[in-house]
Image (cartoon, grey):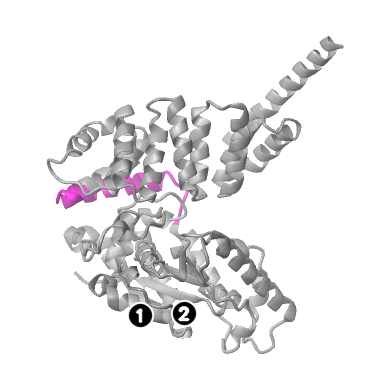
Amino acid sequence: MGAVNSAQQKQQTAAIASVMKNAHLAFASRKYPQAEQLCRSIVAVDPEHVEANELLGGLALQFKKYAAACTFFERALKRSRKNAVLYNNYGIALKMAERFDEALTAFNKSLKFRKGYFEALNNRGAVQASLGQMDKARSSYIQAIKSNPDFGKAYYNLANDSKLDIGDKYQPLFSRLENRLSKLSADNLINACFALGKFHEDTGNYDIGFDYFLKGNKSRKEALNYSVEQDLQRVQSYFDVFKNIENWTNVKSVGFSSQTPIFILGMPRSGTTLVEQIISGLPQVFGAGELPYLHQVLSGLNVERLKKLKDFNHFPEDLKTDLRNRGRQYVELLQSKSEGEVSYVTDKLPLNFMYVGFIRLLLPNAKIIHCKRNPLDVCLSNFRILFGENLNFTYDLDDLGRFYLAYEKVMEHWEDQFPESILTVAYEDVINDLEGQAHRMAEFCKLDWDSNCLEFYKNNRSVHTASKNQVRQPLYNSGMRRYEKYGDRLSPLKNILKIAG
């Protein structure tokens, strides 16, 4: 009988291995639903199967299902407790879920089981930077570089989380990197170009720095199957949903009446992180960062019915109920992110500017702070950053200019339409008059004043955007009129924006 069971077990193990092989092939071919289905068939039989849970975790990460990713990696780790790669991937999922302390523990465990694991060192540094532990973060990046001198991401993070100078302790690292460019893989080269762009910019060699930014952006865009028309059409399609509405007077009768949300939106790099850091310094406010919830709750909404509406006087009851439920769902998700007893929670996803019309429908009492910045400065700031995903328009000056014009058109319309619900805050005004602009934002949002918000750089909330280093310091004006350093190099952008000189 034991021999029969043993034979059956071997047969089942072989069958599972075959399914797992097909799952990997499906994943490699980007047939993600098939890969998921195959892995789920394995965990239905063997819930802690390491490979299946690991691949399911990777799929969940890819589709931004961070809680699910954490669960899958936890299951895999039950049977593979000394797996450095698994702990690293688990740490990434925890980081994206904003469970930063646990992420640090995961990366440290990864490093315990694989000394000098450069990816885990770099990822640990990124978490430390998000927590404001900048010295520790830089130390982690340098350890990653020592472990792998060609690892571009560590140079990129070190450059962006540091103020570099000629003759400082970092210069030899970047000089050596510059001499190794021909030996780098495509991904490492892109990261290295952005890192060297920042290094040369910090040391005053703007022409050389810009050449590196150009090369890095060009390589990044070539690696993508992307046309800016995709994003321009998306912006226009959301805008067109409301083009027939002639009268918004009774919109408050439609959505969910909560006043909890404060949306902070605009172009990326327009000061949204700074504004959230200031606002969340007031005791009634929790800063929740960049959230995907608005897009999620809008999924499946019947926009074709909305396109036919001209006002809100005879609004279909079933559609009104649907919108109210979606608004309530968004607020519940928002409140689940908050800590302690707060009345207001911010969502600072910049590209929510596309959804202003939907925000007014779902959440008519929500406040919107529109962050605005000099168009050349904001476009240049985007061009200097290597973003993760969903900001593909930032890798080309022409694309950036065209996207900026689309954003400007949308926001000018909504500012005219809803002056009582949208406050426009200029980045330059915040830099020049922090207290005045902070008072202005507090009054607009009907928040009690607390001068602690002026010391926003002492706010210990986690920040994991490209501005995480800047908002840990008092205000500085080096980011203003930066475009002047680049002169004619920005001519293509100036031509699109129709800016002289």
Residue 440: give its label: 1
Q: Residue at x 67, y 31 (%)?
A: 48
Look at the image and say whether residue 224 sits in the magenta stretch.
Answer: yes
Question: Residue 393 location in percent, x, y?
Answer: 41, 57
* Residue at mark 2: 414
Name which quarter of the figure residue 245 lies in.
bottom right
* Direction left: furthest residue: 167
- 352 horizontally vs 178: left or right: right
In the displayed structure, 377 sits above or below 87; it is: below
**Circle 2: element type:** helix
- 276 horizontally vs 5: left or right: left
Question: Residue 492 location in percent, x, y?
Answer: 27, 61
Question: Residue 57 location in percent, x, y?
Answer: 59, 39
Which quadrant of the figure contains the C terminus? bottom left
Q: Residue at x 35, y 47 (%)?
A: 129
- 423 horizontally vs 94: left or right: left
Question: Residue 200 location in percent, x, y?
Answer: 19, 47
